[in-house]
């Protein structure tokens, strides 16, 4: 039976990094299993002595009893050693799986958003659950059994040759086709093993997307289409699993049929040799008893090799993620974030350029913009102009490909990501809430160090103030109030409710800089004005950048920046830009609706905000 190829060996050896703490117990368990297997091979030698001694001669009954007791002792010792293997290996094996899963999740959290855009949630879920489970089973069972079975077959083959060279040579003749079939099996199986893993990830993605989009599927009556898609993918996975089963069954059939055939030939030859006194009866009994002990290890080699190749596929998928280097990293000697100035934090974007990949068109092509301390700047532009991309550069969710983003004169790339994101809070247009209580979702916006220093009363007060500013008082009417679990992604709440809780999360940390990607789009104009007034009242000195898609949002800002063709082409007050900037007028007209032909009427929201503030 051929060993796994060199590339498989190299890939699996990389698991030593995680398996090292468990290696002593795994080696001890494997050694116990190996000794148990060698004890099983010793039993035929005892039988040989009994047959050639007391059974074929005038030996005493005591010798037979002694031999029987020795076989019993060896059997009990073998059972104890097998139990030791399970006791030694089971616990550290699960520990290795937990460590690998934790490291994978930690690495996923460290990877930039762009990487997550490439891998679907289902694929990552399959890698962290199914693939690592397969790898763990191989490490604690497959690897040990593969080594023990191969050693047992090797030692058994030597014993067969020593017992009867001619019969041993006949038995080993069957190894030639087995080795050839093993090479064929390895080449075929590793391809379908990887394909099955990838298809399982795609199937998990389909389930995830359908569950998250269940309202859309029901609303448009597309449930049958989703089911048809799922059934097609499930059939593809089933076909691949059947291909694996066929390859393994062919190997198992060969490993059962070929040795049995050679044993049949050896039996006929052995009877003739015994009849002609060329081999003793005891040797003949020992030969076939040894071959019987080898039967199970030989037959299991196909299954164990298949398990090894499955583990190789799972290891490759795990290492694909772990080998993906984070595009964002902290500097070796990070700078310190300056203390908060009395007037607030100043944010500068100097000649900022950004492209999503090498060779792709730049989304931002030299943006120069200053966010004055303590003021609210609205960012206006047509759809696809790069507004959301620009916002994500401030908290360093992406790194600029040219230019710099500065907080109070310090480049964000010179700061740790922890410091940057502790100073900059973000609220997105499409708010994501976690399957946790309302309180926990809001407190997620408070930096960990500050939250740890808070008393329960202080934490509750921070939640209360944030919810009040975000006009999210509805949470107190939920079944368990702040302790109500909002469900996966907060889908138990309406769109406007989710937006207000997400905004409260951004407010709770009292950030130096607040970045808002149109987070109030689901609110009515009056509520938006109330929220904006609350932000000004509570977050005094906070510098705010908000993407504006609605005229009402623009009217509530201190300044407006116009993003056009990857550059900022105008900065000023709303009224001034409306009078002097043609593209700004066009953007507002486009937001008001096609064919309007004139700038939209701007409601007097500043007056409303002043009233709310008073």
Image (cartoon, helix red, strand yellow):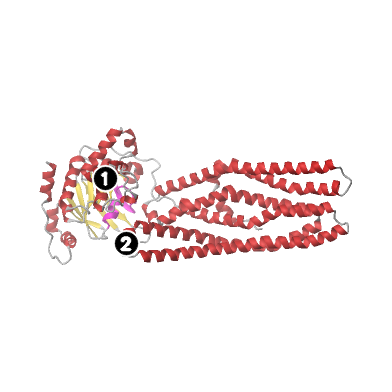
Disc 1 element: loop
**Quarter-of-image position of residue 510:** top left
Disc 2 element: helix
In what quadrant of the picture does the C terminus appear? top left
At label 2, counting other C-alpha atoms closer than 10 Å, the crowd grade (few under 14, some 14-19, many 20 or more) is: few
- Look at the picture and state if 319 lies above or below 24: below
At label 1, counting other C-alpha atoms closer than 10 Å, the crowd grade (few under 14, some 14-19, many 20 or more) is: some
**Quarter-of-image position of residue 332:** top left
User: What residue do we see at 40% from left, 55% from top?
Assistant: 121
Reading the image, the residue beneath label 1 is: 478
- Look at the picture and state if 457 lies above or below 442: above
Reading the image, the residue beneath label 2 is: 218
**Does the segment drawn in magenta span residue 28?**
no
Residue sitting farthest toward the front: 61
Q: Which residues are magenta?
A: 386-406
Percent of width and height locating residue 177: 69, 64
């Amino acid at each position: 039976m051929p060993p796994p190829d060199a590339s498989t060996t190299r890939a699996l050896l990389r698991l030593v990094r995680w398996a090292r703490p468990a290696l002593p117990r795994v080696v001890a368990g494997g050694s116990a299993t190996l000794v148990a297997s060698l004890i099983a091979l010793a039993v035929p030698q005892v039988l040989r002595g009994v047959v050639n001694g007391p059974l074929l001669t005038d030996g005493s009954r005591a010798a037979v009893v002694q031999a029987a007791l020795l076989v019993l002792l060896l059997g009990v010792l073998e059972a104890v050693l097998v139990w030791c293997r399970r006791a030694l290996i089971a616990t550290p094996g699960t520990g290795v799986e937990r460590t690998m899963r934790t490291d994978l999740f930690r690495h996923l959290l460290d990877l930039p958003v762009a990487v997550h855009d490439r891998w679907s949630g289902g694929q990552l879920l399959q890698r962290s659950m199914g693939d690592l489970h397969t790898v763990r089973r191989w490490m604690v069972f497959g690897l040990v059994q593969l080594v023990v079975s191969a050693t047992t077959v090797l030692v058994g083959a030597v014993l067969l040759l020593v017992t009867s060279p001619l019969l041993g040579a006949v038995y080993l003749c069957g190894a030639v086709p087995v080795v050839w079939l093993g090479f064929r099996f390895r080449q075929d199986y590793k391809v379908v093993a990887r394909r099955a893993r990838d298809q399982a990830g795609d199937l998990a993605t389909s389930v995830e997307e359908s569950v998250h989009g269940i309202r859309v599927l029901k609303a448009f009556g597309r449930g049958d289409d989703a089911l048809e898609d799922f059934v097609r993918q499930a059939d593809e996975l089933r076909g691949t699993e059947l291909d694996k089963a066929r390859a393994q069954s062919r190997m198992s059939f060969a490993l059962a049929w070929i040795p049995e055939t050679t044993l049949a030939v050896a039996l006929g030859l052995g009877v003739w040799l015994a009849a002609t006194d060329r081999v003793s009866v005891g040797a003949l009994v020992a030969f076939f008893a040894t071959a019987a002990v080898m039967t199970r290890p030989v037959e299991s080699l196909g299954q164990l090799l298949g398990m090894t190749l499955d583990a190789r596929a799972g290891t490759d998928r795990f290492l694909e993620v772990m080998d993906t280097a984070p595009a964002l990293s902290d500097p070796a000697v990070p700078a310190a974030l300056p203390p908060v100035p009395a007037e607030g934090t100043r944010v500068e974007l100097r000649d900022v350029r950004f492209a999503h990949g090498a060779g792709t068109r730049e989304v931002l092509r030299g943006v120069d913009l200053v966010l004055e301390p303590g003021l609210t700047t609205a960012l206006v532009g047509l759809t696809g102009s790069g507004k959301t991309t620009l916002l994500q550069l401030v908290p360093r969710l992406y790194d600029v490909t040219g230019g710099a983003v500065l907080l109070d004169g310090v480049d964000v790339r010179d700061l740790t990501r922890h410091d940057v994101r502790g100073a900059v809070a973000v609220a997105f247009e499409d708010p994501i809430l976690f399957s946790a209580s309302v309180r926990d979702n809001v407190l997620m916006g408070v930096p960990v160090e500050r939250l740890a220093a808070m008393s329960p009363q202080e934490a509750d007060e921070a939640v209360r103030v944030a919810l009040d500013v975000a006009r999210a008082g509805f949470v107190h009417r939920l079944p368990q109030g702040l302790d109500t679990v909002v469900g996966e992604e907060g889908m138990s709440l309406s769109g406007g409710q989710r937006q207000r809780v997400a905004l409260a999360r951004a407010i709770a940390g009292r950030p130096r800089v607040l970045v808002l990607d149109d987070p109030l789009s689901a609110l009515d104009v009056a509520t938006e004005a109330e929220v904006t007034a609350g932000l000004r009242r509570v977050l005094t000195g906070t510098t705010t950048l908000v993407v504006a898609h609605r005229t009402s949002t623009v009217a509530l800002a201190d300044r407006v920046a116009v993003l056009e063709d990857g550059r900022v082409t105008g900065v000023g007050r709303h009224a001034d830009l409306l009078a002097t900037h043609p593209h700004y007028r066009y953007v507002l007209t486009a937001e008001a609706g096609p064919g309007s032909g004139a700038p939209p009427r701007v409601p007097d929201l500043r007056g409303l905000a002043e009233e709310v503030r008073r």
